[in-house]
Amino acid sequence: MGVIYRAEDTVLERVVAIKVLADPYADDEAIRRRFTHEALAAARLSNQPGTTTIFDVGEHEGRPYIVMEYLPGGSLADRLAAEGAQPPGRALAWLAQAAGALDAAHAAGVVHRDVKPANLLLDDGGTVHVADFGVASAVGLDSFTAAGTIVGTAGYLSPEQARGDRVTPASDRYALAVVAFELLTGARPFERDSTTAEAAAHVSAPVPAASLVNPDLPPELDDVLARGLAKRPDDRYDSCSELVADLRGAFDAAAGHTAVHRRTAVAPPPPPPRRRAPVGLVVAGALLLALVGAALALAFLDGEDDGQEGQPTAAPSTTPETVRETVTLEGTTVVETVVTTAPAEEEPPPPATTEEAPPPDDTRSPAELNDEGFALMQAEDYEAALPLLEQAVAGSSGSGELVEAYASYNLAFTRRALGRCDGILELLARSEEIQGTRGEIQRLRNETERSCGGDGGDDD
């Protein structure tokens, strides 16, 4: 219906996109009205995050145009065509962004009616923006489609759209579930050889199991998508965000007990300083030892004078023996009691009690290692959790699965809890790359940057 140009706004010095109504439709009054509705519907949502911003609306040589923000990242349709199924974390992040924009549109009384990957555009930071409200219906705007007219794209039509019935926000939620199915499996749920057959399948065909289309997906996902693609609007989710939350929950359940540890990481306090004895006490102790030594020496010399030399020495006694001596030193008489104990035979040192635990069983999966490490984290036994989580990260590295995201976060958290800074920022970046932006990740990143400065990214 429209042709899109990349242009430069010479007044504000910015790159923009201009959508112009194509020549074949410029003389069709119904299409011209639809094009105008696109501008009005989108302009009502321009202040909402995740929606393409409209800068201007006008007409040039009898052809309407819309000036909007330029999004250089292409569309999700481009990514699917080039890469196929997307990593779950990336797909969930995109779906969450689209869901927020659509829920905001529904709250404003706008129904998109053509949600599909081609209308989900990426900015240069990889964030999704919902575009092309050209077939939207909006409260307070005149209807521009007759009853029984199908508006939308066959692959993403809700059953009510395919039948020509009234369209509601539930129709957009259905279309987003189709997009979710495609992002995660690389295929549409009701893909057929013809658009007519595909539209009919939305009405009557059972929802296929995503885990069978893509065996890398967990079966827990199937029930969520089945509800999102329910034939009856009332059986679907109440919001797009609720759909995405349950998709994320299905992956969480499949990964095991790998929920993000929410306790704020604090470095353990330093050990208390060793107390030193007062100087006077040390000197007194040294004097006492000197006096005792002198007393023993005198006793030994007295024994020699009494003709005791050459007498056999008794076997050392194992019972204490008390010797009282009076020693005069520079006119000072000191009376001291000395307790001596014969040395006992040295016993071998007891076995070390801090011996490292044997390495974890190598047959355990990264998910199992992460689960065990997380349980130890909850018990605040970070020293024991550390080697398990390091193995979980090493075993899942590069997989792009949620277990890698969870293990990376848990290892980062554990290192901070132990007062370490090494590699934490890289671990958090990898976790965020897979599972999308999470408040827990950002809080730990901020705490690490504040406490560690530039050291939070250096591995050992």
Image: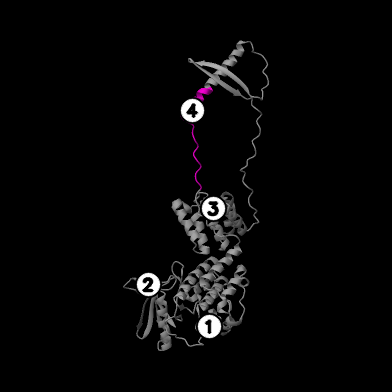
Earlier along the polypeptide chain: callout 4 or callout 1?
1
How would you rate the neighbour count of disc 4 (Cα within 10 Å): few for under 14, some for 14-19, many for 20 or more? few
Which numbered dot is residue 201?
none
| Circles 1 and 3: CB atoms closer than 8 Å | no
Earlier along the polypeptide chain: callout 4 or callout 3?
4
Earlier along the polypeptide chain: callout 1 or callout 2?
2
Q: Nearer the viewer, residue 160 or 55?
A: 160
The amino acid type found where label 3 is placed reads: Thr
For label 4, the SS is helix
Q: Which residues are magenta?
A: 268-289
| Residue 430 appears in the picture as rendered | yes
Earlier along the polypeptide chain: callout 2 or callout 3?
2
From the viewer's perspective, is the residue at label 4 or at label 2 nearer? 4
Q: Nearer the viewer, residue 419 or 284?
A: 284
| Circles 4 and 2: CB atoms closer than 8 Å | no
| Circles 1 and 2: CB atoms closer than 8 Å | no
The amino acid type found where label 1 is placed reads: Gln
Quarter of the figure with residue 315: top right
Residue 393 horizontal/vertical position (percent): 57, 57
Q: Which residue is mark 4?
A: 281
Question: Disc 2 and disc 3: Cα gap in Å?
Answer: 45 Å
Q: Which residue is mark 3?
A: 414
Q: Which residue is mark 2?
A: 15
Q: Which residue is mark 1?
A: 161
| Residue occupying image coordinates x 60% and y 69% | 221
How would you rate the neighbour count of disc 1 (Cα within 10 Å): few for under 14, some for 14-19, many for 20 or more? many
From the viewer's perspective, is the residue at label 4 or at label 1 nearer? 4
Question: Disc 4 and disc 2: Cα gap in Å?
Answer: 81 Å
